[in-house]
Image: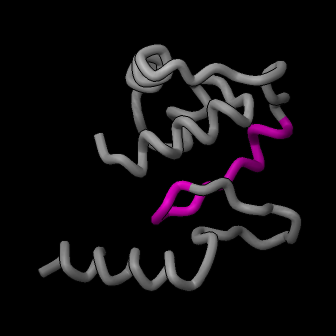
């Protein structure tokens, strides 16, 4: 498990997302997310998100931050620095 995955799990859990929603977003098993949350004490602050709020959840492919989905097009990265770093790492893995 990478550190950025754990940080993404922590951030999403504190934003009141369920284990299943976090797992689906990050491509992990719900049980993995559940065990990480329980071991580290990541608890939601309020009630969980609704289905509509979960359906628009997007996170940065590089750092795992929650993206602003206010405009109509889908975003994959939070900033240009993350986009460039992700492409550099993807190019290295391809070689």
**Residue at the extreme front of the image, as rendered:** 41
Q: Which residues are magenta?
A: 52-64
Is residue 36 rendered to the left or right of residue 76? left
Q: Residue at x 40, y 27 (%)?
A: 29
**Magenta: main secondary structure:** loop
User: Dividing the picture into quarters, in which one does residue 95 lie?
Assistant: bottom left
The colour style of the image is one colour
In screen coordinates, is 11 left or right of 81? right
Any magenta on residue 54? yes
Q: Residue 89 appears in which quarter of the rendering?
A: bottom left
Image x and y of residue 88, in percent: 32, 83
Asked if residue 29 lies in the magenta stretch, the reply is no
Q: Residue at x 63, y 38 (%)?
A: 12
- Name the foreground residue: 14 vs 24: 14
The N terminus lies in which quarter of the figure? Answer: top left
Coordinates of residue 18 in the picture (x, y in percent): 65, 24
Residue 34 vertical placement versus 88 (above, below)? above
Percent coordinates x, y for residue 4 in the rendering? 41, 51
User: Height in image: 49 above or below 63?
Assistant: above
Count of numbered marks: 0
Where 28 falls versus 7 (above or below)? above
Residue ranking furthest to the left: 95
Identity of the residue drawn at 57% across and 62% down? 60
42 left or right, relative to 84:
right
Question: Residue visible at 49% across and 61% down?
Answer: 63
Task: Give the left or right position of residue 61, taking residue 21 as reference.
Answer: left
């Amino acid at each position: 498990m990478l550190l950025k995955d754990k940080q993404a799990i922590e951030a999403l859990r504190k934003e009141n997302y369920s284990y299943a929603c976090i797992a689906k977003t990050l491509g992990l098993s719900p049980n993995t997310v559940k065990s990480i949350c329980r071991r580290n004490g990541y608890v939601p602050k309020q009630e969980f998100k609704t289905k509509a709020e979960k359906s628009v959840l997007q996170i940065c492919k590089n750092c795992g931050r929650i993206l602003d989905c206010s405009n109509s097009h889908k975003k994959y990265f939070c900033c240009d620095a993350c986009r460039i770093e992700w492409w550099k790492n993807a190019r290295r893995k391809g070689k």
